[in-house]
Image (spheres, rainbow, N blue to C red):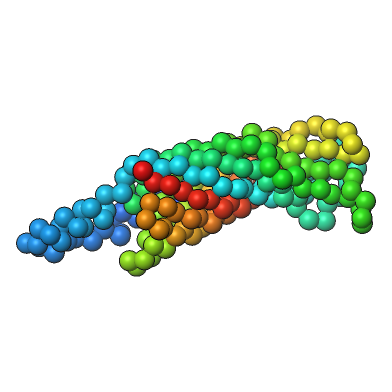
Amino acid sequence: MKMRFALAAAMLLGGVMAMPAMAQTAPAQGDPVAAEKSKAKDDESGVYVSAGINLYFVDKDYAATGIPIEFKDQPSPGAFVGRIGYAFNKYLAVEGELGIGGAKSDYGNNDVTLGNIGVEKPMAAHVVGRLPLADGGMYLLGRAGYTSFTVTREYNGRSASDLKLKGASFGGGVGARYGSWDFQFEYTMVSADEADSGVLGMFVQKRF
């Protein structure tokens, strides 16, 4: 399982690094106006910030560690997340993120709530690749890096021991660009030693 995740992450990073070479197009020879427009279009480097929501799909067996409960579905607590990144061009960027706990995921038997699960201290750092689709504002994105977060738990009104998840992460998604604003929808897999989890993210990004 870990080998498969590592191989997929390596392939994603290789694709990210190859994007600029594959997607670059040369301006018309002898046309300075076209060359200047092409340069301006390709020069999208700079700082950007993002804000959004992550839903953390925690492995249901690991989430039940030390608690006399069996989950039928993966608990999915949420967190509010902020990001800051730097784009080298329109194809390649690096970014880091921090967050705070958001909506907790309740669990129980039938109509009786027995407790809840939340997320605290979510952190991540990723290399991000973008592949524009035609001349529109839509693009595909890929991510590879590192993610960590703490799972807080409550059972029958009492706090249970926290769970820590951290490890390599990779994923992908789609984005739409409108002027200096981007809207992104993505899914990231987290390959931790303790258990594998997924993160569904929805973000609004502002470029400077």
Q: Is residue 58 visible?
A: no
Residue 162 left/right relative to 41 = right
Name which residue lies at 58% across and 41% down: 81
Q: Nearer the viewer, residue 207 or 165?
A: 207
> Which residue of the protein is positioned furthest toward the left in this rendering?
30
* Location of the C terminus (image quadrant): top left
Q: Nearer the viewer, residue 149 or 43?
A: 43
Against 135, is 100 above or below? above
Tag count: 0
Q: Quadrant of residue 127?
A: top left
Name which residue lies at 46% across and 39% down: 84
Name which residue lies at 61% across and 42% down: 80
Q: Is residue 27 visible?
A: yes
Residue 119 left/right relative to 67 = left
Q: Residue 57: percent from the left, percent from the top? A: 69, 50
Q: Residue 177: percent from the left, percent from the top? A: 41, 58
Q: Residue 151: percent from the left, percent from the top? A: 72, 38
Q: Quadrant of residue 22?
A: bottom left
